[in-house]
Amino acid sequence: MGFLLTSCFVPLSMATEAQELVNVGFVLYSKSDAPGTLKARWNYANAYSGPGEATGGPVEGFAGRYHVRYFFENGEFSDEYDLVIEKTGDFYNVSWIVDGKVGARGVGMEVENGLAVGWTKVAN
């Protein structure tokens, strides 16, 4: 399986020589009408972005375990992960996991429209 943090973590070889990507991403999760489901809007290095959907989470709040699928703006599938959101005081720790290995980590906070999370790829 690729690593979105393939769409979000697009290999640097895909970047043009004139464009240097920073290993920083952002995602905004908002509650969906379906219980336990989050809508996602992600961006990686201001070069790649798109929608996504996290399913299988708790009915209340954001903290929990989900399965998330991300897409590019054109609707093409990007990647999928096990997503773990943990509340720590007023903030959140977030992990994106593939095959039992954490591929990215982030920190977030609740905002008016959902859960805002900044993240970075974890070196393997």
Image: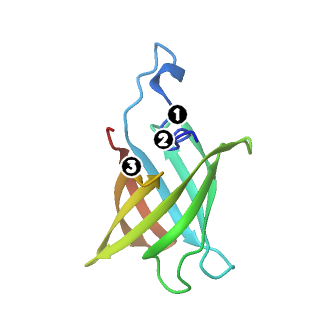
Q: Residues within 10 Å of mark 3 (few under 14, many from 20)?
A: many
Q: Which residue is mark 3?
A: 104
Q: x, y percentage for residue 101? A: 39, 51
Amino acid type at image mark 2: Tyr
Residue shown at the point (28%, 77%) measured from the top left:
90
Q: x, y percentage for residue 13? A: 49, 20
Occupied quadrant, residue 33: bottom right
Q: Which mark is residue 47?
A: 1
Find the distance from the CA under tag 2 to the CA under tag 1: 6 Å
The quadrant of the rendering that contains the N terminus is top right
- Position of 49 compared to 21: left or right? right
Amino acid type at image mark 1: Ala
Circles 2 and 1: CB atoms closer than 8 Å: yes
Q: How many marks?
A: 3
Residue shown at the point (49%, 28%) measured from the top left:
11
Name the one closer to the observer, 20 or 7.
7
The quadrant of the rendering that contains the C terminus is top left
Chain-order first, disc 2 or disc 3? 2
Residue shown at the point (51%, 86%) measured from the top left:
60
Occupied quadrant, residue 7: top right
Position above or below: 91 against 81: below
- Position of 17 compared to 124: left or right? right
